[in-house]
Amino acid sequence: MNQTENTTVQEKKYTFPTDFWWGTAASATQMEGAAYEGGKGPNIWDHWYEQEPNRFFDGVGATVASDFYHQYKEDIALMKELGHNSFRMSISWSRLFPTGEGEVNPQAVDFYNRVIDELIQSGIEPFVNLYHFDMPLALQHQGGWESRDVVARYVDYAKVCFELFGDRVTKWFTHNEPIVPVEGGYLYDFHYPNVVDFKRAVQVAYHSILSSALAIEAYKESGQAGKIGIILNLTPSYPRSRNEADLHAAHLADILFNRSFLDPSVLGTFPSELIDLLKEQDALPLMEELDRQKIATHTVDLLGINYYQPRRIKVKEHLPNPKAPFMPEHLFDYYEMPGRKMNRHRGWEIYEKGVYDILTNLRENYGNIECFISENGMGVEGEERYRDADGSIQDDYRIDFIAEHLKWVHLAMEEGSNVKGYHLWTFMDNWSWSNAYKNRYGFVGVDLTSQGRTVKKSGHWFKRVIEEKGFVR
Ligand code: BGP
């Protein structure tokens, strides 16, 4: 399958299987726009932007985003042109159900049908995610993920999606990075509802995990033959040193930020140390008797891995203020490794080998579950300065970023990892939750004034990679 040939002394050909999934990922709120059109109801992002536009970079909200709602045909044609064989999108819950429940919005059904059909007709397999940070506002008013009723509403919504689109969609995902709404909304104040409360954060996390298991159960009961999975941001925790204290600190960070979602999703269990830690903080969530069995039984078929940066950890060096609310960081400190490679625009370290470490861990400790890289990418501010005379952005840094990660993916495959594809974040520049349009991630540049699209150098490069089933480097 993925043989490696030496072409010159220094260069190597990295060959990927013929059926490797090549494409990009995006989400409804970040690309669709039409926030107040087509019968869509408000979600927490529309609401928060109305309340506090200053919390968004340059005061830009997601109201127009990249206008995919109107330009989807042209955008899908461009995806086809760039060689995609798959594309991950999400359904906007509050577009399908304006209040999150009740009557389905026929205009939304029509829109998603058109998008899915257009993708399939273009030879691009739609990977469809049900939840990407966008709680319908009406359900947030009922408590959002803190509420058990909202879990039930989510399962209703998932069932309707399977019924409406499951005849054509055979790769489903229950959540994208479900830990992020926990962190952003209930710990660190970067998502609505801006709560800072560890116990409530744990309840939100628990309900997200439960909702995923129940949606998987519903999918299996539907009798449809596709696969259903979850997309997790897996962030390896590297200790500063081999010192016992550093090792332990990194272990705790791993349990809290990776294994909290990875273990229940793939193995159907929670790490016992996580349960002990929550007990110590008097933060165990409310659970019902059958939950554990549901979570144990309905694990994922397929795992999406979002990887951007590692987490470097050292032992906690100073006692936290006893009056400060409990935070995971009371158990460890972050560590800035001297000489680390940085994407300074986003403030994230670039450590390509991390993707290999994740894949190896999945192979060794998670039954080598079928997986793919569902997001990886590089957001850069001010890309206009790289535009050449022909109007194309010369983003060689993005090509390097992708190729250097793919090399490690390739090595993991050679060693037996069950990794089936690579999706870049993202297809065209899109709106980011707190950075709006500051950092650009796309293979395709978007001019926000004209909504015009131009393919960047990386987009042309990726097309060649797909055609040639790999690259030489
Ligand atoms: C992931 C999210 C995406 C996207 C990406 C880039 O965590 O799944 O929605 O936003 O990160 O991050 P950012 O937009 O914060 O730069």
Image: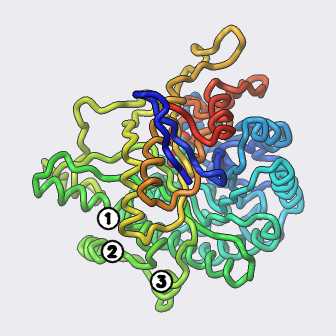
Name the residue at 45% across, 53% down: 414
Please report whichever mark, 2 or 1, sits nearer to the chain's N-terminal start: 1
412 left or right of 224 in image: left
Quarter of image, ligand 1: top right
Judged from the image, the secondary structure of the residue bearing numbered disc 3 is helix
Report how far apart the C-alphas of labels 3 and 2 lie in the structure.
13 Å
Residue 39 visible? The answer is: no
Check whether the beta carbons of the residues at disc 2 and disc 1 lie within 8 A of each other: yes
Indicate the amino acid at tag 2.
Answer: Pro
Which numbered dot is residue 394?
A: none
Quick one: label 3 or label 2, which is nearer the N terminus? Answer: 2
Residue 213 percent location from the top left of the image: 56, 77
Q: Quadrant of residue 301?
A: bottom right
Whether label 1 touches label 3, CB < 8 Å: no
Q: Does residue 188 sit above or below 251 in this rendering? A: above
Q: Secondary structure at mark 2?
A: loop
Any mark on residue 296, and which? 3
**Residue behind mark 2:** 271
The structure residue drawn at horizontal position 35% and vertical position 76%, both measured from the top left corner, is 284
Describe residue 213's horizontal placement relative to residue 460 as left or right: left
Expressed as whole percent of the image width and height from the top left, the position of residue 21 reads 64, 52
Q: Is residue 244 above or below residue 151?
A: above
Q: Which mark is residue 255?
A: 1
Which is more toward the observer, 46 or 409?
409
Q: CA distance from mark 1 to mark 3?
A: 18 Å
Q: What residue is shown at x 47% (from left), y 48% (from top)? A: 409
Q: Residue at x 27, y 53 (%)?
A: 329
List x then y, in percent, for residue 43: 67, 55
